[in-house]
């Protein structure tokens, strides 16, 4: 998952909120403890002051009892207990004055107040004292943390369908439109988006099916008269006109095959029919379906190797490159140079007037292509991209050089002819 994902953002916000609340509660506990300590000190200060006043005769017993009304601080009268506490207790705070002194002492988790006037010592026990406890604050913090955690889980569960929707969008982007599923699971906005996406995909699927049916029906209907016409042409007396007529029907048959390729490339090619074959066989097939003289094509091959490709589609791509080269070459000749890195198609001619990207768009024609549909390079580009290759162009020394680059992506280990035949049979 990406670090910029909404799930990471929400998690960060909740962690930040929980940390902030935890720090706030730490500060609150410290602040509350300080207040508690100040209240105890104020209480002991009042008791010590009034006790000293009483012991020195400044106030009478009635006033003393009135001042300490509601405060439970009984005197420790047992001398042995008193001596033990005075000896072992820890002095927390001690205050001296002209009329005497006082000290707050801690012994066995109880607070004691020592009041001394001249030689007389009183030891008072705080019966109401309770050590400072964090229980209430801890309970409140735990409740707040649980509420935040529940809110986090609720939000994440609400956003969880986004991941499912993203996976379906990824499937759609790969062209696997038939695998897209409806992941809508409620009535919230995310489910509505998922529902709308699935409806759109269903509509696109329906349109694609209609288009495929239409194209295949046209190709099927055209093949019958073309086949009959070619058979009839083969039966008439052989002369130059008969050869031209046969050539026309062959060209029409080739165009039907190209229409099939167009239908496949515009449907996002999926290479389901790949096999291992020699590059020589692919070149030979391309020359055959291009219906050109062998003398018009010169092949320069550095070594023999095999490739893993869709044989029919790759042959159509090479055939289109041969057609393109011969169409725009003044000497009607093309050189094909094959290495384990790239396949080059080299022909004499003028430099392209625009960038290659312009010519690989569908229905883009060159200046001398009045009879072309403008689909040649478009088909080529789609086929080789499906094979993870790149189409490149350069002009050097009066030569147009088109290249299928990154050939190593389809290159396989050298195999013997028997293995190739077995893979073709399979």
Image (cartoon, rainbow, N blue to C red):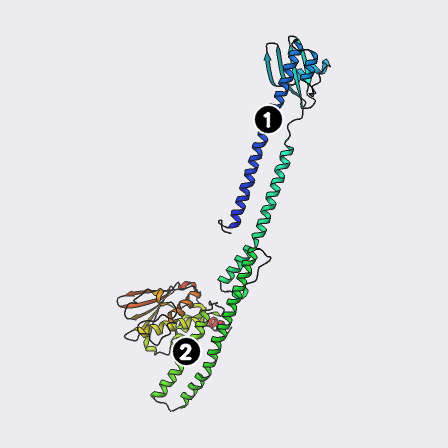
Query: In which image quadrant can residue 137 be found?
Result: top right
- State the residue lying farthest toward the right: 78
Q: Quick check: 260 left or right of 104?
A: left
Task: Give percent across and percent down for residue 225.
Answer: 45, 84
Label 1: few (<14), some or many (≥20) within 10 Å? Answer: few
Is residue 415 visible to the viewer in this orientation of the structure? Answer: no
- The label shown at residue 254 is 2
Q: Earlier in the sequence, mark 2 or mark 1?
A: 1
Secondary structure at numbered mark 1 = helix
* Total number of numbered discs in the rendering: 2
Label 2: few (<14), some or many (≥20) within 10 Å? Answer: some
- The label shown at residue 344 is none
Q: Quick check: 251 left or right of 12?
A: left
Of the pair 375 and 151, the residue shown nearer to us: 151
Whether 379 is drawn above or below 225: the answer is above
Query: In which image quadrant can residue 326 be found?
Result: bottom left
Of the pair 65 and 279, the residue shown nearer to us: 65
Secondary structure at numbered mark 2 = helix
Task: Give percent across and percent down for residue 268.
Answer: 46, 67
Task: Give percent across and percent down for residue 18.
Answer: 56, 40
Whether 36 is drawn above or below 100: the answer is below
Q: CA distance from mark 2 to mark 1?
A: 95 Å
- Badge 1 is on which residue? 35
Q: Residue at the location (61% across, 37% down)?
A: 141
Q: Residue at the location (73% across, 14% down)?
A: 78
- Cβ atoms at labels 2 and 1 below 8 Å apart: no
């Amino acid at each position: 998952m990406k670090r910029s994902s909404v799930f990471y953002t929400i998690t960060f916000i909740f962690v930040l909120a929980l940390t902030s609340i935890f720090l706030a509660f730490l500060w609150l506990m410290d602040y509350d403890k300080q207040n508690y300590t100040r209240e105890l000190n104020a209480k002991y200060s009042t008791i010590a002051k009034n006790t000293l006043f009483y012991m020195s005769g400044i106030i009478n017993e009635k006033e003393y009892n009135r001042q300490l009304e509601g405060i439970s601080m009984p005197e420790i009268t047992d001398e042995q207990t008193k001596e033990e506490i005075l000896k072992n207790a820890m002095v927390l705070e001690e205050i001296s004055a002209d009329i005497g002194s006082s000290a707050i002492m801690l012994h066995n988790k109880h607070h004691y107040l020592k009041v001394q006037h001249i030689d007389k010592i009183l030891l008072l026990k705080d019966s109401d004292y309770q050590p400072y406890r964090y229980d209430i604050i801890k309970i409140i913090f735990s409740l707040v943390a649980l509420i935040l955690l529940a809110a986090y889980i609720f939000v994440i569960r609400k956003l969880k369908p986004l991941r499912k929707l993203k996976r379906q969008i990824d499937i759609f982007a790969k062209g696997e439109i038939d695998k897209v599923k409806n992941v809508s699971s409620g009535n919230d906005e995310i489910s509505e988006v998922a529902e709308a996406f699935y409806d759109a995909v269903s509509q696109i699927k329906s349109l694609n099916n209609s288009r495929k049916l239409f194209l295949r029906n046209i190709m099927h209907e055209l093949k019958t008269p073309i086949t009959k016409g070619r058979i009839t042409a083969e039966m008439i007396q052989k002369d130059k006109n008969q050869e031209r007529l046969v050539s026309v029907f062959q060209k029409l048959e080739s165009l039907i095959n190209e229409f099939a390729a167009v239908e496949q490339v515009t449907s996002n090619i999926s290479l389901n029919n790949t096999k291992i074959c020699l590059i020589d066989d692919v070149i030979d097939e391309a020359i055959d379906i291009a219906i050109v003289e062998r003398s018009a094509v010169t092949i320069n091959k550095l070594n023999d190797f095999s490739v893993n490709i869709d044989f029919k589609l790759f042959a159509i791509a090479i055939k289109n490159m041969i057609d393109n080269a011969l169409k725009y070459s003044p000497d009607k000749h093309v050189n094909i140079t094959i290495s384990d890195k790239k396949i080059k198609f080299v022909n004499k001619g003028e430099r392209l007037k625009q960038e290659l990207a312009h010519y690989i768009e569908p229905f883009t024609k060159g200046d001398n292509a009045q009879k072309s549909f403008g689909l040649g390079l478009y088909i080529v580009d789609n086929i080789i991209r499906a094979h993870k290759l790149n189409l490149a162009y350069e002009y050097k020394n009066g030569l147009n050089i088109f290249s299928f680059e990154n050939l190593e992506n389809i290159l396989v280990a050298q195999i013997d002819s028997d293995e190739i035949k077995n893979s073709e049979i399979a």
